[in-house]
Amino acid sequence: MSFAVKILIWTNIAAFLIGWLVPAFNAYLALVPRDVIERYWLWQPITYMFLHAGPGHILWNMLVLWMFGVELERLWGTKFFLKVYFASGLAGAALTLLLSVLPISVAATFVDTPTVGASGAIFGLLLAYALYFPDRPIYMYFLFAVPAKYFVMIVAALSFFFSNTAWPAHIGGLAGGYLVLKFGRARPLAELKYRYFKWKMNRLRRKFDLHQGGKAKDWDRRVH
């Protein structure tokens, strides 16, 4: 098992056991939009990722983290793997918070409802796996072989239609994972430096390069 996946799994298990023994622990660290917005409990968008509602919840999330996370961490390295993981989880929290403040009827569903689980971060990893290995078969419910790209679509759809309040974290995790994969390796300063160097080289080339002119038989058709 890779390093970050191992640490994440043991941290989630420890947090689950503490929350099971001390229920107030979950109430303090779960993502509750009203607490974040009105009481400024700004740690909740991070801590909610390490809490789970029950044994089945944590078992499924840790199984998926192990199944897909190990290969992705070995592919990317630990640093970028953690970047994708936490960015996806934070994006799930951000979408939950956004929906809770919008002037729509569904906002009341989220504003006081605790959200827990690593699912937002997990969904970001699932999307990454589907993008890197789109045709690799995944056995859904351990019975049906489904290509990874379709597996993620099916799981996202099931989450949207059958999850009461956790679906924003899942959908936000997908979006966060995609954005990090697309822009997460970008280095703005290095890009600006490259653009300036390219512009400077083109300017020098226009000034000193060879230019063709005249007819093919002209002795001076190449002019500096």
Image: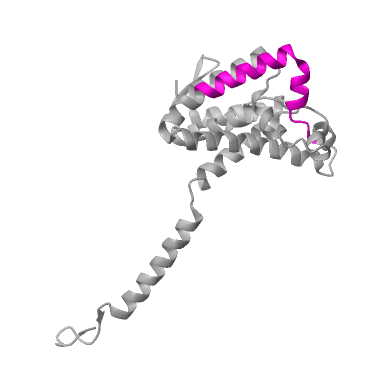
- Residue drawn at x 55%, y 16% is 141
Question: Percent position (x, y) of residue 52?
Answer: 68, 20
Question: Percent position (x, y) of residue 219?
Answer: 14, 87
87 to 148, vertically: above or below:
below
Quadrant where the C terminus sits is bottom left
196 vs 7, nearest the viewer: 7
The magenta-colored residue range is 6-33
Left or right of residue 156: residue 126: left
Residue 164 in sight in this render = no
Q: Quadrant of residue 57?
A: top right
218 to 10, vertically: above or below:
below
50 vs 172, nearest the viewer: 50
35 vs 126, nearest the viewer: 35
- Residue drawn at x 63%, y 31% is 120
138 to 210, vertically: above or below:
above
- Residue drawn at x 32%, y 80% is 207
Question: Percent position (x, y) of residue 4?
Answer: 50, 27
